[in-house]
Amino acid sequence: MNIILNKENVIGKIKPVHGISNGPLSSGGSCNTSAEYLEMGIPFVRLHDTDSPYPQQVDVYQIFRDFDKDPYDEKNYDFLLTDQFLKAIDGVGAKIIYRLGTSIEHMPIKHWIDPPKDSHKFAVVCEHIIRHYNEGWADGYELGIPYWEIWNEPEELTNFRSNMWSGTKAEYFALYDVVSKHLKQCFGDSIKVGGYAAVGFQGILPDASMHSLEYLQYFHDFLAFVKENDCPLDFFSYHQYGMNMKFVRDAAHYARKHLDEAGFGHADIIVDEWNASASTRELYWIGTMRGARHVLSMMMAYQDSPVDIANYYDGQPHMAHCGIFDKFRRKQKPYYSFVAFNKLYRMGTQIEAVCDDGGLTEALAAKGEDGKLGLLVVTSMQDPYLTVKGFDKKPAAYILSEEKNLEEVPVKYENGTASIVYPTGTVLYFEE
């Protein structure tokens, strides 16, 4: 298999698509993966299901626990645990996407998923959470949190399941109207406000279920509502579970097309939950080499799409969807996929990398301001031999395989061509 690098053909910036859901503290603070987050170079952390299934922080109702109290009085807020979790994220240099609302509830009887009984009061509470973390209110901080997301998956209520929102579509739209306008009036362009952390775009698939089609209609109704009511929408967020890379790209283009047509061409697109599906079969391998290849395939798909930011779900070792660590905080194979992608991200600029095997091998290349070149390759399961043209000098080569974790391996270089023999189905990283 052959790859040709063309460093003169600049495609754009390497995007921060190696973000993570939740920060380096978990399990009530007893687990701290800050050193690992630093090595992975996590650019964004999205806060939702923090310390699930028993969250005591981040959620609006965990911070402001008695909704009957005065939202202007700092004594009615409990920031203590959330402060510690957010300081740990700030300590690893990641920016925050803060979900305003509540975490998922799986028990039959729910506590917090009902629509707020007073939308304006809820907005004022959110305002003061922002003031605490961005303006220092109530002995707070100046973290400069850019993204504030209003709720999560409110469209779940379709007589299918309702673990996130018990209200109607109209009730969520009304809440978004009040909260988004209030927050932008308070903070202007110093923050970005958006939502709605949609379930996803499975409705565009040929075999879409009834529920997926309902979710898709929800998206169109939401855009029509925010446009008609002149609501701010600085970003749109949605979720993506599964392995179909064509669908990954198609969903992003679908979102971009309809956002643009509705007049929201300025809105960022954030996929703030992605992973394999929730099936036991797929969760079984998310921490393996197959999972490592899948992680990089997703990152490359988002790089080659209109998505601006993407966050893997989830970074907490105790969570079933965490393929980065096992439950004992030991690094698993996808961990090294994040480390490798971050090397290209730090270089900054994507350049052309052309493969000749019809898409069986995936490649992403970058160059730094110093002219250094990097190439990341997710190899096919068939061809054990690779040549790369375009390096000006002999590159170093590193392999992620069943036996090795980005360890250097021999590479031949002559007449401007680097060549390497490797086990199939591995990940290779080259750096000039």
Image (cartoon, helix red, strand yellow):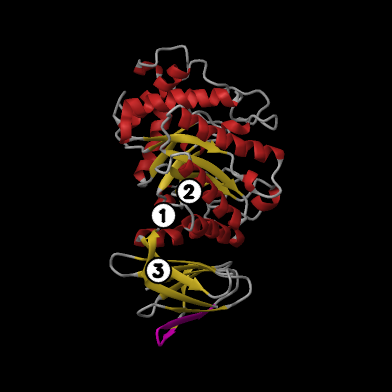
Residue 390 as seen in the image, left or right of residue 356: left
Q: Residue at left 52%, top 33%?
A: 224
- In magenta segment, residue 95: no
Residue tagged 2: 310
Which residue is farthest bottom? 415
Which residue is tagged 1?
A: 15
- Which span of residues is magenta-colored? 413-421
- Is residue 180 shown above or below 217? above
Q: Secondary structure at mark 2?
A: strand
Q: Which residue is mark 3?
A: 374
Q: Which residue is located at x 36 percent, y 38 percent?
A: 146
Q: Amino acid at mark 1?
A: Lys
Hey, what amino acid is under mark 2?
A: Ala
Labels 1 and 2: the sequence-earlier one = 1
Where does residue 100 sit, x and y in percent of width and height? Answer: 46, 30
Is 414 covered by the magenta stretch? yes
- Is 307 placed above or below 5 here? above
Earlier-in-chain disc, 3 versus 1: 1
Q: Residues within 10 Å of mark 2 (few under 14, many from 20)?
A: many
Separation of disc 3 and disc 1 at Cα? 15 Å
- Residues at badges 1 and 2 in contact (C-beta under 8 Å)? yes
- Identity of the residue drawn at 40% across and 12% down: 70
Q: Amino acid at mark 3?
A: Gly
Q: Could you give the CA–CA distance between mark 3 and mark 2, rounded to whole angstroms?
A: 21 Å
Residue 324, x across and y down, in percent? 53, 52
**Dot 3: few (<14), some (14–19), or many (≥20) neighbours within 10 Å?**
many
Q: Nearer the viewer, residue 248 or 71?
A: 248
**Point 61% across, 39% down: residue:** 216
Element class at badge 3: strand
Tally of marks: 3
281 with respect to 17 (left or right): right
